[in-house]
Amino acid sequence: MGMSETKNKEMIFHEIMDVLVGNYGVGSQEGIKAVLTECQKLFDCVSMNHQQQIANVFQLDKKVISAMIKFMPTIKESIVEYEVVCCSGSRCAENGSIEVLKAVKQTLGIDFNGTTKDGRIRLSTQNCFKKCNLGPNIMVNGELHHKMDKTTSIECMKNIIQIT
Ligand code: FES
């Protein structure tokens, strides 16, 4: 899967989420079911990262989302433990993200859209998290880490590698 295809899918997914939360309202289980179905269709699974994003949009705890997935046999949860998404947007680039992206790749020992050999960590990029003033930004399992630089991003990745 190419990087631009991934980016498009993320954008499509966010648009779908916006529409569905508008139709069903925050906290709606029916709305979440609809989003999970769309996520499965787009990505063939629901990653930790996407679960967190759905929880944020529907203003619910992520635990509610994973509990619902267990009752939906057609939905597959991603086996990846850590989803690392680096911002590849131009504003973050102006704030020094090029160095951050390089450091993240080197520390994890993988390229973008790659997964570590043990299958625990997947790395990808997203074009802008709409938090440009706090960039460079890295998202780990749906949680944003702001104002990253070479040192803090290496530290952040080392923490993930060590946690089992
Ligand atoms: S460019 Fe990185 S958050 Fe907007």
Image: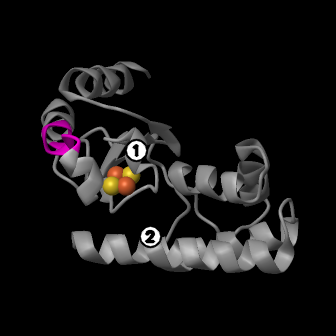
Callout 2: 10 Å neighbours few (<14), some, many (20+)? some
Mark 1 residue element: helix
- Residue type at numbered disc 2: Glu
What secondary structure do most residues of the magenta stretch adopt? Answer: helix
Q: Which residue is mark 2?
A: 10
**Residue 97 covered by magenta stretch:** yes
User: Residue at (61%, 49%) from the top-left corner?
Assistant: 52
Percent across and percent down for residue 79 are 48, 49
Mark found first going from the N terminus, 2 or 1 = 2
Q: Is residue 84 left or right of residue 48?
A: left
Q: Residue at x 70, y 52 (%)?
A: 55
Rendered position, 131 above or below 90: above
Vertical arrangement, residue 143 with respect to residue 131, above or below: above
Q: Position of residue 132 (x, y in %)?
A: 39, 50
Instruction: Indicate the position of residue 137 as horizontal and vertical percent values.
Output: 36, 42
Q: Any magenta on residue 33? A: no
Quadrant of residue 46 in the image?
A: bottom right
Q: Which three-letter amino acid code belongs to the residue tagged 1?
A: Asn
Magenta residues, start to end: 95-101
Q: CA distance from mark 2 to mark 1?
A: 21 Å
> Which residue carries the number 1 mark?
133
